[in-house]
Amino acid sequence: MADKDKIYIFDTTMRDGEQSPGASMSVEEKIQISRVFDDMGIDIIEAGFPITSPGDFEAVSAISKGLKNSIPCGLARAKKKDIDACYESLKHAKRFRIHTFISTSPVHMKHKLNMSDEQVVDAVKESVTYAKKFTDDVEWSCEDGTRTTLDFMCKTIELAINCGAKTINIPDTVGYSIPEEFAKTITHIKNNVPNIDKAIISAHCHNDLGLAVANALAGLSAGVRQIECTINGIGERAGNAALEEIVMAIKTRNDLMPYDTGIKTELISKASKMVSNATGFPVQFNKAIVGKNAFAHESGIHQDGMLKNRETYEIMSPESVGVKQTSLVMGKHSGRHAFKDKLNDLGYTDVTDDVIQEAFGKFKVLADKKKHIYDEDIIALVDDSLIVDNKINAINLKSLKVYAGTGEPQKAEMTLDVFGDIKHTVQTGDGPVDATFKCIKELYNHDVKLLLYQVHAVTEGTDAQATVSVKIEENDRTTVGQSADTDTLVASARAYLNALNKMLIKREKKSLSENIEHQKVKGGV
Ligand code: KIV
Ligand code: ZN
């Protein structure tokens, strides 16, 4: 490994990824995800864009304090107040990176910035020099790089390096480039920027033409040594290059790409699930590496080949990305100790005793109801308990009975604990889920918009647990709630309540943070 070039993995799931319409994550969720990223060996974690909102500021600050190995990073436009916000949010970290950017393409300079070439050059000089006062680790990006004239790009890169930038990021902001062209751009930079050896070249590729990963990998052969990517490929519009695809492509085709990312690939599946849960964005079944079907072999010929030798149809093992073969785990007689060992095997190494106790209680209940319990069932239980552990349950489900079927209007009867008051109601609705949600509205009067209601079976069979995700919106704030149960309606009620409880916390935080002075910048990059 020692003689292989190191490729730095820069994750921007919590910044660019969160810019996917509707993909917001709470600060608590970001902290939990950042711990897994840290354990995975991600080199740099872009935790947010601190000037944009108090929530982003708080997330960057909280994440940066907790990282053991990864370098926290914040994004800033070429403005002093953005860079100040970055510094304020990162200053408690042992070391940190400030990532500052400005558009350099003619179309962006004219229509978005309304700035001349000279003004952009001045802004590059000023912003990089200013960021450098706070840290030695400054990254500079020429936004819309792939639609920038090569001469102007080289001029601004040379200047940014002279002002102290150590990483130069080339964004394909609108996902316009194709692999050969992207590689040529990097080669041109290598050959025409005299001080380029003083910086690491980075690729930040968007997926509008489905070429983000291909472009980033093409960049490697031309000299890129940092790749910016996101888990599950989430990000603006069609998303960013997917981290799991980049890392596994390098690992699997190390014969042609002899590089080392240092990523513990066994944590990929866990990270993917956490990001999907936090954002409420499902992973498409056939998604490379992390899709449900990525390691499934359906046809008889393939299954036959696999049984004879896995290499016939498998270029990497599911275990190498942390996907355990769905296995029968334990029965209702299994003890707490075996349950804890199982959690360890599944990658839950740092969960508290309270969470284990809570999940174990649910496991016993499930074992009574369900014949076969699979790893995925246990994962759903423990994830559910982790949410409870965040102490965000002011409103709790006590009981639910639903009457469904043909003919009669569907009816739900519910008892809730609302801040300690036990309340009961019966409501009819347009279907059992509607009746269930109406009960919650009746028992706790609130006005939120339901943005997403989604059910997926965790394992196969009619006795499978269902994981329900619910996303709600109130005054531009969104929360995602989740729950798993063999009863889809119970899971639905709990998921809705989970989202609602999180919304109550957001409301509380909002009123606190109104005292903090922050300038809100609308829109993303
Ligand atoms: O896509 C883009 O250009 C960006 C930059 C801020 C790096 O996200
Ligand atoms: Zn981007």
Image (cartoon, rainbow, N blue to C red):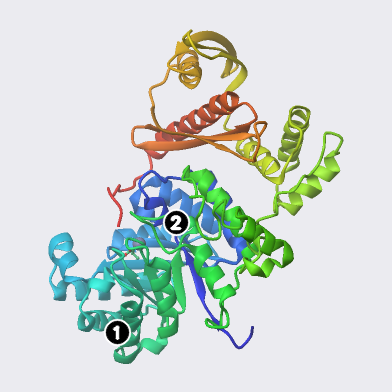
Q: Where residue 158 is drawn, which disc sits there? A: 1
Residue 154, quarter of the rendered image: bottom left
Residue 316, quarter of the rendered image: bottom right
Q: Is 305 situated left or right of 153 in this image?
A: right
Label 1 crowd (10 A; few <14 / some 14-19 / many >=20) = many
Is the residue 151 above or below the residue 493 in the image?
Answer: below
Q: Which residue is painted at 38% across and 37% down in the image? A: 477
What type is the residue that disc 2 sits on?
Answer: Ser
Relative image position of residue 285 (x, y in whole percent): 51, 50
Relative image position of residue 373 (x, y in whole percent): 74, 39
Is the residue 222 above or below the residue 215 in the image?
Answer: below
Please state, as top left, top right, bottom left or bottom right, where the N terminus lies in the image: bottom right
Q: Is 331 situated left or right of 19 in this image?
A: right
Question: Closest to the observer: 422 or 398?
Answer: 398
Please state, as top left, top right, bottom left or bottom right, where the C terminus lies in the image: bottom left
Q: Which residue is mark 2?
A: 89
In the current view of this chain or complex, which residue is farthest to the front? 301
Question: Given this view, does label 2 or label 1 mark the residue nearer the observer?
Answer: 1
